[in-house]
Image: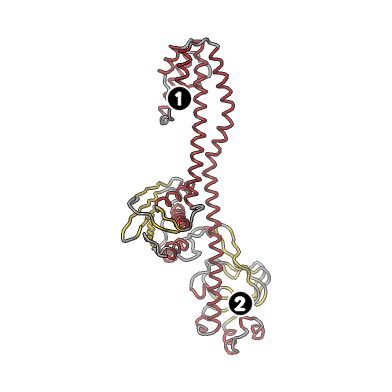
Amino acid sequence: MLERLRQIPLFAQFPQQELEILLKQSQILDLAAGEFIFHDGDAPTGFFVILSGELEISKVLGGQTIILANEGTGSFVGEISILTGQRRTASARATTDTQLLEFHAQVVESVRSTPLAELLLSKMAQRLRDTEAHISQQEKLSALGKLAAGLAHELNNPASANVRAARQIPGMLSDLQRLSFSLHDYGLTVEQIALLDDLGQQLIMQPAPEPLSALALNDQEAKLLDWLDDHHIANSWKIAPALAAERLGVDVLEMLAAKLPAEALPAALHWIENTLTMIGLARTVAQSATRISEMIQAVKAYTYMDEAPIQNVDIHDGIESTLAVLTHRLGKITIQRAYDRTCPKISVYASEVNEVWTKLFENAIDAMPDGGTLTIQSECSDNYVYIEIIDTGRGVPAEVQSRIFEPFFSTKPMGTGLGLDIARRIVVDRHHGSLRFTSKQGDTHFIIALPLVMET
């Protein structure tokens, strides 16, 4: 085995005595293809040198297994947890029949001043950088996917409403044209035509009335139906709801009945019903288009598209655009705001700060699956703007509170990361601010401090 180790570049320069010491503290481990040597979250027991075969290093993120690396003969794995004392941050599985040399954890203590320790530390630093870059890229792709899914969800309803309205408009225009021509067959006077024209213009130009309660709407429809049936108006079931929704009561019907010929009244009422339906379709198109435009503006504001990385911003605008992008996830959650609008604009990496709000809001939302209250407060003092995000969710368990800012740490199922290490780096490392929290059941506070003047 000593000569076999000598053939591995990792151990080629080791003194004979150190290799003999290492071998005494190691054991051979044979793995069949598909067998794991450790899983993400396992306690560290040792590190491994690959004598032959190959190991696949993977991690579950967002329910998907991500391949971080494939290590072959001469490589070693598992050193990060040994040196940091933390649990495994990934899983290792043999892709072929593989033979390993396993060193137990206590070996590190016995070789701290040897070339092996230096090699382990160097390899760990490189591997951490590679893993962090890989996970960061995956986080960005995941965030982009969530943003796209959320945007698609939010745009679907108004877009579908527009399509439905567009399909109905041609038929409604045809009916309106036919009814308009038919009114002339009743020999209406100029004054009577002017009366209908004025009523139509009034309905078209006035804003949509506040909707009635369900009970009030039913009462109004019932009164209109009774009147229409008493006057033998066909299809009263179609006319009454349209009139009630627009708050046109029996008084309007009585006025029309008094001023129009009896034989023209049914055609006039159907013309009014068709006009109201067309108005409703036009409002639907306008509201849907406005909603789509608002969502596009929110996404542009959230990402600071086509703008420089450092922006002079009102921090509240970024919070609001983030909330707009996450609307589809809020469900039964109530948002409470207590903003200090006297806070000045600050210079920040704007899209990155919005990423912080996204991470914190998503974790708060996940903590309140059945609804709750998300409170956002701001205050300016001591050359900082302080943002406090409070949720009434289940809280962070006391036993893991010391770990939530660790890279890759998660309390969520299927490997979904909290992302708080990313949030901390953006706030603390990029902006020289601070990020702290307190948490208990029903009351979690995250407090973010960003300097009013960013150091460069």
Residue extending furthest toward the bottom: 17
Q: Which residue is mark 2?
A: 49
Across and down, in percent, residue 38 comes to 57, 69
Q: Amino acid at mark 1?
A: Leu
Across and down, in percent, residue 438 comes to 37, 60
SS class, disc 2: strand
Q: Residues within 10 Å of mark 2 (few under 14, many from 20)?
A: many
Residue 67 placement: quadrant: bottom right
Across and down, in percent, residue 122 comes to 54, 77
Q: Which residue is mark 1?
A: 203
Left or right, 36 with reference to 351: right
Q: Amino acid at mark 2?
A: Val
Pick the residue in front: 415 or 67.
67
SS class, disc 1: helix
Left or right, 406 with reference to 58: left
- Decide if residue 439 is in sight here: no
Number of the label disc, if any, that sits on residue 391:
none
- Decide if residue 395 is in sight here: yes
Real-space CA distance between mark 2 and mark 1, rounded to the nearest whole angstrom: 81 Å
The quarter in which the C terminus is drawn is bottom left
Is 43 located above or below residue 198 in the figure? Answer: below
Residue 221 placement: quadrant: top left
Residue name at image x 48 percent, y 73 percent: 85
Across and down, in percent, residue 4 comes to 66, 83
Left or right, 439 with reference to 146: left
* Of callouts 2 and 1, the N-terminal one: 2
Q: Residues within 10 Å of mark 1 (few under 14, many from 20)?
A: some
Pick the residue in front: 141 or 345.
345
Q: How is the image coloured?
A: secondary structure
